[in-house]
């Protein structure tokens, strides 16, 4: 799992106290990330 995260994690900078996407582009990126996790069996 750690290797997968290192190789595939979205390139978003963390923001303190905020966990929601800032715009539609970030939302799409997060959805692709979640789909990749699912496809990899995580």
Image (cartoon, rainbow, N blue to C red):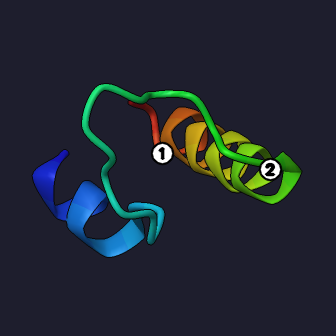
Question: Which of these two is toward me, 16 or 6?
Answer: 16
Count numbered badges in the picture: 2
Point 27% across, 56% down: residue: 5
Circle 2 crowding by C-alpha within 10 Å: few under 14, some 14–19, many from 20: few
Q: What mark, if any, has residue 26 been given in the picture?
A: none
Element assignment for label 2: helix
Point 41% across, 29% down: residue: 18
Element assignment for label 1: loop
Which image quarter is the N terminus in? top left
The answer to whether 30 appears left or right of 42 in the picture is right
Q: How far across and down, in percent of the image, does residue 32 sit?
A: 70, 51
Q: How far across and down, in percent of the image, does residue 12 sit?
A: 45, 63
The mark nearer the N terminus, 2 or 1, is: 2
Query: Quadrant location of residue 3?
Result: bottom left
Circle 1 crowding by C-alpha within 10 Å: few under 14, some 14–19, many from 20: few
Question: Which of these two is toward me, 31 or 37?
Answer: 31
Which image quarter is the C terminus in? top left
Question: Which of these two is toward me, 24 or 42?
Answer: 24
Gap between marks 2 and 1 measured at Cα: 18 Å
Q: How far across and down, in percent of the image, does residue 28 sit?
A: 80, 50
Q: Does the residue at mark 2 contact the one at mark 1 (Cβ under 8 Å)?
A: no
Which residue reaches farthest left? 2
Vertical side of 24 occupied by 16: above or below: above
The answer to whether 37 appears left or right of 16 in the picture is right
Where does label 1 land, which residue? 40
The answer to whether 29 appears left or right of 18 in the picture is right
Point 63% across, 45% down: residue: 30
The residue mark sitting in front, 2 or 1, is 2
Point 57% across, 29% down: residue: 20
Where does label 2 land, which residue? 28
Which residue reaches farthest right? 24
The answer to whether 32 appears left or right of 36 in the picture is right
């Amino acid at each position: 799992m750690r290797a997968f995260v290192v190789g595939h994690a979205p390139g978003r900078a963390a923001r303190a106290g905020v966990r929601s996407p800032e715009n539609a582009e970030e939302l799409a990126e997060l959805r692709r990330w979640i789909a990749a996790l699912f496809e990899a069996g995580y």
